[in-house]
Image (cartoon, coloured by chain):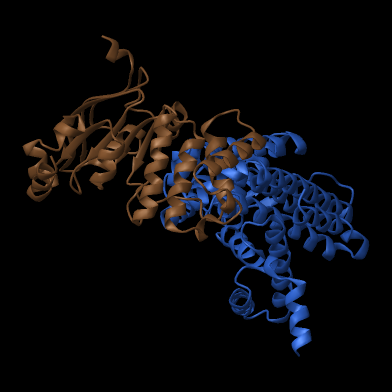
Amino acid sequence: MTRANFALLILIVIVASLPLFGGAYALRVGTLACMYAIFALSWNVVGGFAGYPSFATAASFGLGAYVTGILLNNGVPLPAALAGTFIALFLGAVALGAVLLRLRGHYFAIASLSLVEVFRELINNATDLTGGGMGLNIPLASSSGILADAMFFFYAMWGLLVLTALVVIVVSVSKLGFGLSCIRQNETAANMVGLNTTLYKSIAFGLSACFVGTAGGLYAAWVHYIDPSDVFDILYSVKPIVMALMGGLGSPLGVVCGAFLYLGLEEVVWRNYIQIHSGVLGVLIIVLLLFLPHGLISLRWAMVWRKVKHA
Amino acid sequence: MPEMQHEILHLSNVSRNFGGLRALRDVSISVSKGEVLGLIGPNGAGKTTLVNTVCGVTPASAGVVTFDGRDITRVKTYQAARLGLSRTFQIVQPFAEFSALDNVAAAALFSQPGESWKSARLEARTHLAFVGLEAQADQCAATLTLAMRKRLELAKALAMKPKLLFLDEVNAGLNSIEVERATKLIHQLAARGITIVMIEHLMKVVLNVCTRIAVLHNGELIADGAPRDVIKNQAVVDAYLGQQYAQRNAARG
């Protein structure tokens, strides 16, 4: 295992100790941090490894939330509902990917963006199953108190993050990751050396959907109520891209750092500039990208050291 | 018919249209095992289209392509590669961020299902050595010179263990010393028994290495035969070689 991947696992283990330091607020932020890290790691498989800028994260998230929500409402226990969501999202995304990934660059980006709208409208109109615009109430998972519930969902999301990180690390050092890297650099040449690019890209798209979908399912169980405009929020598609760019495109450690940094900025800015928070956040992100175009991962101690010496 | 047994590639009445443009018209040609076939013709004659059609990049609009006794008219590019058809590109197509070694290892790894990382890397070294790039093995492909990148293409193609190798203008853009070196490599490949179809504009190289020449013009095959006969063919002189070349050639005897 490379040092960066090792550092990533250490970082995630450190996150697990969060409940020691705070109450309900820390748990909420921690759960969101794990969720964002799952988004960023998942997006990185198709966006970072294969170089296909996907805007489908919100579609996977929303769909996952609804699949789990509907299963829970039909009496399926939470673990089984999440497993079902995971499998359904993976297979669905592989099938969709085989069609959509024939498009490249901006065309693919637009097509993946339209997935969000298509699924939002489908869920909106399938009133019998999903409650449509009225939203879907989801039964409480347990009744052991608010803090115990928060603790449960934090560790559930954290566990999912660990699973995502492990799978992404395995992919990054495997033949699959190597092939995706070939596709990113030169898809024509990749095809010509005997690489089944359609299959590889579809698997990448499937992997980028199933963890996000399962996170969506956990989210639905966590907040007990979902509606289409909440879970199919286009911001869920944009945020992971910003996180990946901030942290360092292609690097699992980088994108997770980017996710944590993004959440940190979001929380701090939201608290202090409640009226203009998205404006301030935007400016901060632009400044970060201007001065650190390759993301946090490109930071080296040597850079700091050199500046200190010259000062 | 002993010749038929050694046939490795056969195109019968192959056409390829791009909208209204007929890039290949009713081309029928056969390539025998161990042959070095030169494919010549003016720009836009359909030489690269022919290679693309065989490799599944732009499948034939009509006609049948058989390779090694199997109909490959509709196979996908990656399947053609796994069957033993490999090619170099006129415009080199490296994996720019990878080292030269990883470029070749990728070709070995993906063209042969079941190939392991370790043996792909090992094989890659021998192919790099063969094309004279062992010193550049760990260098990033984007930083190699054009001549080196052309040789890298060749190493990649060889790593796929080809039964038939298409060389698309491997000498274009090279200086005369580099051309000499590349020509020597092609001779060595032919000596290994690899069937080669090469697109080439330098007649000196064509006459030096090819055992047979086919000429395309406006998507049609206008001549096919022994080099000596083809360069005297009036249609070929008119369409491609030019009167001057024919006269010089006649003067030389």
* Left or right: where A17 falls relative to A164: right
| The N terminus of chain B - image quarter | top left
Q: Position of residue B44 (x, y in %)?
A: 20, 47
Q: Position of residue A263 (x, y in %)?
A: 71, 67
Along the line of sight, the residue nearer the viewer: A53 or A96: A53
Residue A107: x percent and y percent?
A: 41, 54
Residue B175 position (above or below residue B121): below
Total marks in image: 0
Seen in the picture, residue A292 relative to A39 is either above or below; the reply is below
Instruction: Tell me the residue at 15%/38% (across/down).
Output: B231
Give the quarter of the image for residue B46: top left
Residue B200 visible in the displayed image: no
The quarter of the picture where the C terminus of chain B appears is: top left
**Residue A152 at x, y percent in the picture:** 84, 49
Q: Residue furthest bottom?
A: A311
Front-most of A206 and A52? A52
Residue positioned 61% across, 40% down in the render: A176
From the viewer's side, name the closer residue of B60 and B166: B166
Chain B: colour as depicted: brown
Q: Residue furthest top?
A: B1
Quadrant of res B52? top left
Q: Work out whether residue A284 can be spotted.
A: yes
Question: In the figure, B114 relative to A161: above or below?
Answer: above
Q: Toward which corner of the image does residue A264 lie, by quadrant?
A: bottom right
**Viewed as shown, does residue A288 lie left or right of B7?**
right
Is residue A69 toward the left or the right of residue B231 in the image? right
Chain A image colour? blue
Point 72% across, 68% down: residue: A261
In the displayed image of the protein, which residue is found farthest to the right?
A20
